[in-house]
Image (cartoon, rainbow, N blue to C red):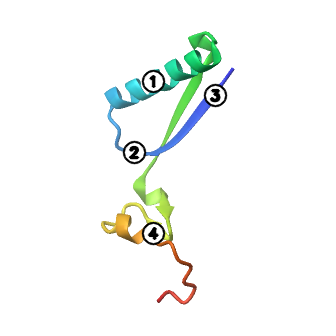
């Protein structure tokens, strides 16, 4: 039985989550030729305060530019 775990930020509405789960299930059923009741999807929502990238917390208003650092700069300059 496939178990699909999705870690995501909070903020998706109920309809989006319903469609997401349905889409993941349908794709898995079609790809592996298994019955839908053998597919388990778990969405684990995490608050933006508990998620980060490139040393920046996702709730930071400047998250996008700050999280796109591609060079290692240990001095912080």
2 or 1: tag closer to the N-terminus: 2
Looking at the image, residue 65 lies above or below residue 77:
above
Disc 4 from disc 2: Cα separation: 17 Å
Q: Nearer the viewer, mark 4 or mark 1?
A: 1
Side of 32 relative to 11 (left or right):
right
The residue where tag 4 is placed is 56
Badge 3: residue crowd in 10 Å (few <14, some 14–19, many ≥20): few
Quadrant in which residue 60 is drawn: bottom left
Residue 10 is tagged as 2
Callout 3 secondary element: strand
4 or 1: tag closer to the N-terminus: 1
Side of 19 relative to 76 (left or right):
left
Residue 3 is tagged as 3
Disc 4 from disc 1: Cα separation: 31 Å
Callout 1 secondary element: helix
4 or 2: tag closer to the N-terminus: 2
Looking at the image, residue 53 lies above or below residue 40:
below
């Amino acid at each position: 039985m496939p178990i699909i775990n999705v870690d995501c930020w909070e903020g998706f509405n109920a309809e989006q989550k319903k469609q997401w789960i349905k889409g993941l299930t349908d794709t898995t059923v079609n790809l592996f030729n298994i019955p839908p009741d053998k597919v388990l999807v778990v969405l684990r929502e995490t608050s933006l305060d508990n998620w980060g990238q490139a040393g920046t917390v996702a709730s930071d208003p400047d998250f996008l530019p700050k999280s796109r650092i591609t060079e290692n700069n240990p001095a912080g300059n």
